[in-house]
Image (cartoon, grey):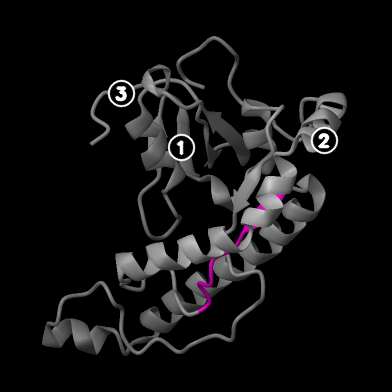
Amino acid sequence: MLGERTFDDLKVPCALTAVDLNTGREVILKRGRVADAVLATVALPGIFPPKSWQEYYLVDGGLLDPVPVALARSLAPSLPVVAVVLTNLEPEPLKIMESLPFLPDIPLLRQITHLRVAQAFNVFLHSIDISSQYLATMRLKIERPEVVISPELKDIGILDQVDLIEISNRGERAAEAVLPELRRKTSWSSRIGRYFRIKQPATIETLLPAGTDKQ
């Protein structure tokens, strides 16, 4: 669907985040092919392969910043930031995985799922959830988005099969719940207040030099 579109072709300003495994630093992706940036920002370690880009080895930016509020604010400093939080902010108990949901129904593979590797994989996924919960909570407290939309997703795991219509409905209900707050944050008084408080966020660290297609 994205084809050869670049960030310059997009009608709405956009930037994505990734983490370089070589340096352990956050990378802001806002130039070049959008498809390459998407492959980098969804490369959850252990699930999808890292994206090799120039001399960098990129994985999911959520490892360092699950909700990149400061990045959104840098794209449009005069507008309120609406953060959509898909991470469960309250820890959930570990569920014992009896099978790996993405494996086909083959007798040999069913036996494999009972080995320790399946449970180790389950613990790995749960560990990612815990880390994301902590990071998201801390970043939201520090960067304070004007509005937070948090759909009800506690019952959904990283690899669970989902009903897309039901997921969409949950998102719509969560958005409708914050409409009054969103209207307040877009009022003239709020706009004037933001005008006098605007400053570029200090938390955004761009790894690559400006003016290059690597960034």
Check if residue 153 falls in the magenta segment.
yes
Along the polypeptide, which appears first: circle 1 or circle 2? Answer: 1
**Position of residue 19 in the picture relative to residue 97 (left or right):** right
Check if residue 170 falls in the magenta segment.
no
Looking at the image, is 128 positioned above or below residue 196? below
- Verify CB contact (< 8 Å) between mark 1 and mark 3: no
Question: What amino acid is at disc 1?
Answer: Tyr
Q: Residue at x 39, y 39 (%)?
A: 38
Q: Position of residue 204 (x, y in %)?
A: 70, 32
Helix, strand or loop for disc 1: strand
Residue that numbered label 1 is attached to: 57
Helix, strand or loop for disc 3: loop
Q: Position of residue 55 (x, y in %)?
A: 46, 26
Along the polypeptide, which appears first: circle 2 or circle 3? Answer: 3
Mark 1, other Cα within 10 Å: few <14 / some 14–19 / many ≥20: some
Residue that numbered label 3 is attached to: 5
**Position of residue 215 in the picture relative to residue 74 (left or right):** left
Along the polypeptide, which appears first: circle 1 or circle 3? Answer: 3
Q: Report if residue 67 is visible in the image.
A: no
Q: How far separated are the C-alphas under marks 1 and 2?
A: 45 Å
Magenta span: 146-154
Helix, strand or loop for disc 2: helix
Q: Nearer the viewer, mark 1 or mark 2?
A: 2
Looking at the image, is 36 positioned above or below residue 48? above
Q: Report if residue 25 is visible in the image.
A: yes
Q: How far separated are the C-alphas under marks 2 and 3?
A: 38 Å
**Position of residue 138 in the picture relative to residue 176 (left or right):** right
Q: Nearer the viewer, mark 1 or mark 3?
A: 3
